[in-house]
Amino acid sequence: MPAESDFVDLLRALAGHPAARGLLDDAAVLEIGGRTLVLTHDMLVEGVHYLPDDPPGDVAWKLVAVNLSDLGAKGARPLGALLGYTLAGDTAWDAAFVEGLYTALAAFEIPLLGGDTVSAGAAGPRVLALTAIGEAHGPAPSRSGAAAGDHLWVTGTIGDAGAGLRALRGELPPDPALVESYRTPRTRVEIGPDLAPLVTAMMDVSDGLLIDSARLARASGVAIEIELEAIPLSAALVRTLGDSRDSRLGAATAGDDYELLFTASPGRGIELLDIADRSGIPVNRIGVVGRGAGLHLTEGGRPVPLPPRLGWEHR
């Protein structure tokens, strides 16, 4: 089976419309009637993106959050959503999912506009999908605008969701904060529109900080250098895993963070910190953009070898 990137390469021949952005971005950006619409579609597969015994309401929240994260990365505010749902013969699970979906949509003030259901019986895993529609009233940053001399920033903290998954699998001591980060991830859709006019490139961190930084570097045709010690870790993660090179590399290669990763010119730092102050969502400078290509790591100013695995990839 080809890797995800190989399959997307095959699809590029079909995605010639400018809105598709060459399938190199988080979402489609459609200019129509003087409006900038942003459309994104994400799927969750049982046993791959969530654990079979995760609460259905949490699964619904995650489904909404991962889509809104893509809208936030384009500086868009949500307008509505379409649901794709697999019926698996468990009406109690279905009801709990709908209750959780109501909670998530209400929290972000998004209407459900429609969708589709299919029946799979009990034969296979549930496959859940959501299409989120938003509108950008300013720039809709791509992944391809980073330039040499820019600084690399990220919102929030990194690695909590990955540690939460490990805790649920029994690999780490249970920590409610880490488990919550995995099951009900934060979404930064509220800060995206404020950041969008100031950044040169922006995307969300879904598959891991390192692999997504490498994707941003590739899309922009630049090199990115990340300072390992600058990657923000939560108190819960440090309490569980400590603060070492290994724990930071583990955090930086874990997925499901859904923070915003962006580049901006050095002169934007004060404005970015002011947005963080007003929103209560921290932003941290974690690296620099340079000429060349690829991803590079440093610690204390010295090069650090990249780990063999940068993050999550479907195969």
Image: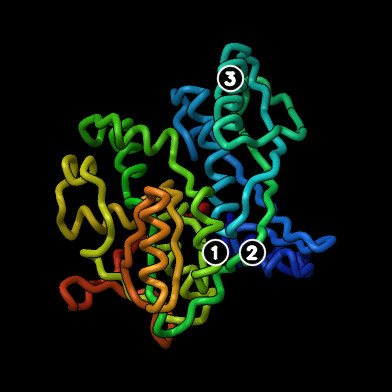
Q: Is residue 69 left or right of residue 240?
A: right
Q: Amino acid at mark 1?
A: Ala
Disc 1: which residue: 196
Alpha carbon of mark 3 to alpha carbon of mark 2: how far? 34 Å
Q: Secondary structure at mark 2?
A: loop
Above or below for 221 versus 283: below
Image x and y of residue 283, in percent: 36, 58
Return the residue nearer the eye: 113 or 313: 113
**At 52% across and 24% down in the image, what residue appears?**
57
**At 62% across and 22% down in the image, what residue appears?**
98
Above or below for 142 versus 311: below
Disc 2: which residue: 138
Outermost residue on the right side: it is: 33
Q: Is residue 210 left or right of residue 172?
A: right
* Precedes in sequence: disc 3 or disc 2: 3
CB contact under 8 Å: marks 1 and 2: yes
**At 15% across and 73% down in the image, what residue appears?**
300
Image x and y of residue 205, in percent: 45, 55
Q: Is residue 60 left or right of residue 156?
A: right
Q: Amino acid at mark 2?
A: Gly
**At 62% across and 50% down in the image, what residue appears?**
77
Disc 3: which residue: 99
